[in-house]
Amino acid sequence: MLFLGLLCGHSFAQNVQKIEPVKFSEVNITDAFWKPKMDKVATTTLQACIVQTEVKTPRIRNFEKVARKQGEKHEGIYFDDSDVYKAMEAMAYSLKNHPDAELEKKTDEWIDKIAAAQLPDGYLNTYYTLNGLQNRWTDMEKHEDYCAGHLIEAAVAYYNTTGKRKFLDVAIRFANHIDETFRLANRPWVSGHQEIELALVKLYRTTKDERYLKLSEWFLNQRGKGNGKGVIWDAWKDPAYCQDAIPVKDQKEITGHAVRAMYLYTGAADVAVNTGDTGYMNAMKTVWEDVVHRNMYITGGIGSSGSNEGFSQDFDLPNENAYCETCASVGMVFWNQRMNALTGESKYIDVLERSLYNGALDGLSLSGDRFFYGNPLASIGRHSRREWFGTACCPSNIARLVASLGDYIYGKSESGIWVNLFVGSNTTIKLRNTEIPTSIETNYPLNGKVKISMNPSSKTKYALHVRIPSWATNVPVAGNLYHYLGNYTTTIAMIVNGKKVDFKTENGYAIIDREWSAGDVVSFELPMDVRKVVARNELKQDNERVALQRGPLVYCVEGIDNEGKAWDFILPDNAKFTEVPQQVLTEPIIAIQTDATTFKPTPDGLGFKPEKKRITAIPYYTWCNRGSGQMQVWLPRKVKSAMVNY
Ligand SMILES: [Zn+2]
């Protein structure tokens, strides 16, 4: 294989893709946890995006100015076009599960404006078209290809939902322009903010035109050759900042800007899936271990440092000062889905689920119209959710992720059906020539009961693969970066039509391989007991601390439920937990209550005496929805670690 690889550029492995994810456009979401959030995105979040994009900021006006050709100047930041496209991508996904004629009309209106701003040669970027077209494609850091990537993603999503081609044709013309300008012209170009790589693979899958796959691979191959340079701001002062220090296939460690890294590796995994290039596959696996085993928060967030919006040293994960950008968690969802498709291993979905339900979801307020850019794991009360940001990447990113949830639930392969996430939904999966309507019913993550129903049109033999989450077993999380305190033994029984069945477990999936008939129902229950998690010693900021997890949800203690204070107690190791159904605003949750120890000054003022304090913990993603205040995910176990800022 190695020699073959050397001869032809990459080695084409057979059947390299283990799982083909079922697309959002084929999945109806009915879930009690997610459907209300998707409805909130469809109404409130997207309305906020529309108002910000169209009324409060000049983003849409820039497109109108290009079309008017009256010499008007660009307003805003050079990458603002991307926010328009990301909002449109979210609108496209949302129209699938929440049809809305007004929203579709608005999207079509924007598409007309965007199409009118495209130049005859396919180029489309309001910043350069308004401020000096002669300067286009001269500064690799100016995000032209990044904006193009988001345009392509939006166009593909809108085509998938509506079947309308106009936006897709705009994207195709722009992609062709880029291909002619760079790959065919053999002109070096290193993307300063990766994104176009993964977008081009989506365009390839939609159009089946290999040109876009080749262009995506070309962009990957540009990296690590010393060609990157920014003119106004040189992101390449440290080439590791934009993952350009060494060729992608030789990369072993995560470096630099977290979102750029996630988009790059998603694109690399996409190319590997489609070309079978083992070089990319092996690099991705090694880099993934560096991210997850040494640089990931328990919330699935990444990129601890604000100075480079990215990674610092291994095991450096400050809590209160965590940067942990919402977009980076969204990127973790993308990348891990691709790694799962590539390998058929559930550990990638375990991480995807962790990032989705915690690090990413925390970025969106329960009301749907407030956002976090960074997602800290502790606060003394100085964090608050915001309406919008100058650099507004996060709001539309979390909107498009929630709206596209259907992309992450089911998969299929030659051997059968895969269930990755437990989300109430239905779809029809076609295996060979048999249509198999499949649905999931569950109240996850409030409880762990899951029911999968399948209705093959005729009796069919195939394997059902059900992910057994690593949190449900006693397997250490993230390669032992985190592990459970105490022993949890779990046996998960698989019930088919009311009878317990034997199954084998492979790569983290329970596999039931048999002949299935219409009306077959598989049910099982995941253990939702409260689990205490501790971090490896090297993770200094979490020393002598414990985090609480229930199912996929990481918990935190917030001041508002605890007399305003979340930093005034220690949690004894023998604490017993009570699960209490509650609401945070209108969000139904299971709160965790336990007895902690607080310290009150003695009457003589000379010391402190321990006192019992009943504390309440809530799911991390629900914090800071009732005003700013204290919060902690990692709860101190010893007095000396209790009152320190960390
Ligand atoms: Zn962001």
Image: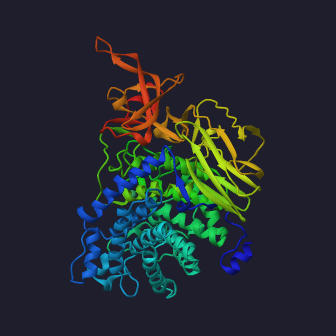
Given residues 24 and 332, the one toward you in this image is 24
Q: Is residue 315 above or below residue 242?
A: above
Q: Residue at x 53, y 62 (%)?
A: 25
Can you give x and y, in whole percent of width and height, for residue 143 in the image?
A: 38, 72
User: Which quadrant of the picture is home to ligand 1?
Assistant: bottom left
Q: Residue at x 73, y 77 (%)?
A: 4
Q: Nearer the viewer, residue 591 or 190?
A: 591
Along the horizontal axis of the image, is 507 left or right of 326?
A: right
Rendered location of residue 455, percent (x, y):
68, 53
Q: Is residue 5 left or right of residue 403?
A: right
Q: Residue furthest top?
A: 604
Label tally? 0
Q: Is residue 379 left or right of residue 577?
A: left
| Camera-nearest residue between 226 and 158 | 158
Percent position of residue 606, x then y: 31, 15
Is the C terminus in the top left, top right, bottom left or bottom right quadrant?
A: top left
Q: How is the image coloured?
A: rainbow
Residue beneath the point at 43% across and 80% down: 174
Task: Provide residue 443's location: percent of width, then percent of height.
Answer: 54, 40
Asked if 131 appears above or below 582 in the picture, the reply is below
Specify whether residue 377 is in view: no
Which quarter shows the N terminus? bottom right
Q: Is residue 504 visible?
A: yes
Q: Is residue 70 above or below residue 496?
A: below
